[in-house]
Image (cartoon, rainbow, N blue to C red):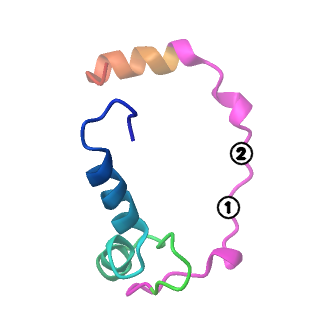
Amino acid sequence: MVKSSGNQAEAQEFLAWLVDPEGGQKILGETTPQYPLTEGVPSSYDLPTLDTLEPPVFDQGSLQNTDQANELMKQSGII
């Protein structure tokens, strides 16, 4: 939320709704194959529990070539 926003109260209310188990998290759990962020919100999809996932080990230091990344973003029109 940007401090200079003229809609501070509305932005705060929206953020609260996003993480509410009966608000945004319920919609996320019922309609998308994503993990709800709020504990106790079930998913309608047969997702494995997070503690059973075995993500690959990845060295983020290998992403140091920002020049190549910037060039790809320029070519794609993102920037």
State whether residue 4 is above or below residue 48: above
Which of the 4 image quarters holds residue 19?
A: bottom left
Task: Tell me which segment is drawn in magenta.
Answer: 43-67
Q: Which residue is mark 1?
A: 55
Q: Secondary structure at mark 1?
A: loop
Whether the residues at callouts 1 and 2 have beta carbons within 8 Å, the answer is yes
Q: Position of residue 22 (x, y in %)?
A: 35, 82
Magenta span includes 50: yes
What's the magenta bit mostly, secondary-structure-wise? Answer: loop
| Residue drawn where x is 41% and y is 74% of the image | 20
Image location of residue 63, percent across then percent down: 63, 28
Q: Nearer the viewer, residue 78 or 28?
A: 28
The residue pinned by badge 2 equals: 58
Residue 55, picture quadrant: bottom right
Give residue 17's position: percent from left, percent from top: 34, 67
At x 51%, y 74%, the residue is 38
